[in-house]
Image (cartoon, helix red, strand yellow):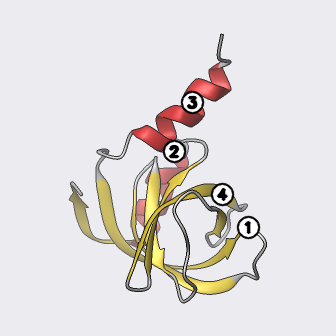
């Protein structure tokens, strides 16, 4: 029987239809086994994000996103296209943390991907 953390992790990877908010957040991104590089997050939801990626990233690869003032967030690459990567968080982002980030960085409002 799966644990509650396994179910939570699966939900983060499967719930890709949650509202995403367009924003611009300076961040650091690091792929598993790679060096961290500067990035910009383009959209964010409690289940994932898309961001600029100067390095080619591959579906299924693990990575870590560091946003200003937060600890690194583990995610899995879902897609990479023309220097933009889409990732699903390994664990859903806390709605409180998500709302705080939106208050700090939101510029155009929510939309559905």
Within-10-Å neighbours for mark 1: few <14, some 14–19, many 20+: some
Q: Is residue 34 left or right of residue 38?
A: right
Badge 1 vs badge 2, beta-carbon distance below 8 Å: no
Q: Which mark is residue 16?
A: none
Near-viewer residue (6 or 26): 6
Within-10-Å neighbours for mark 2: few <14, some 14–19, many 20+: few
Badge 3 vs badge 4, beta-carbon distance below 8 Å: no
Q: Is residue 96 left or right of residue 75?
A: left
User: Which residue is label 3 attached to?
Assistant: 8
Dot 2 falls on a residue whose secondary structure is helix
Q: CA distance from mark 2 to mark 3?
A: 17 Å
Point 66% across, 86% down: residue: 37
User: Which residue is label 4 attached to?
Assistant: 73
Q: Given this view, does label 1 or label 2 mark the residue nearer the observer?
A: 1
Q: Given this view, does label 1 or label 4 mark the residue nearer the observer?
A: 1
In the figure, 1 relative to 52: above or below? above
User: Which residue is label 1 attached to?
Assistant: 32
| Residue projecting furthest to the top | 1
């Amino acid at each position: 029987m799966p644990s509650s953390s396994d179910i939570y992790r699966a939900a983060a990877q499967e719930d890709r239809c949650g509202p995403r908010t367009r924003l611009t957040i300076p961040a650091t991104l690091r792929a598993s086994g790679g060096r961290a590089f500067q990035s910009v997050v383009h959209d964010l939801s409690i289940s994932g994000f898309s961001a600029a990626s100067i390095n080619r990233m591959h579906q299924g690869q693990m990575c870590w996103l560091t946003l200003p003032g937060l600890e690194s967030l583990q995610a899995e690459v879902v897609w990479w296209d023309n220097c933009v990567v889409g990732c699903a968080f390994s664990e859903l982002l806390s709605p409180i943390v998500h709302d705080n980030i939106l208050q700090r960085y939101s510029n155009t409002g929510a939309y559905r991907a």
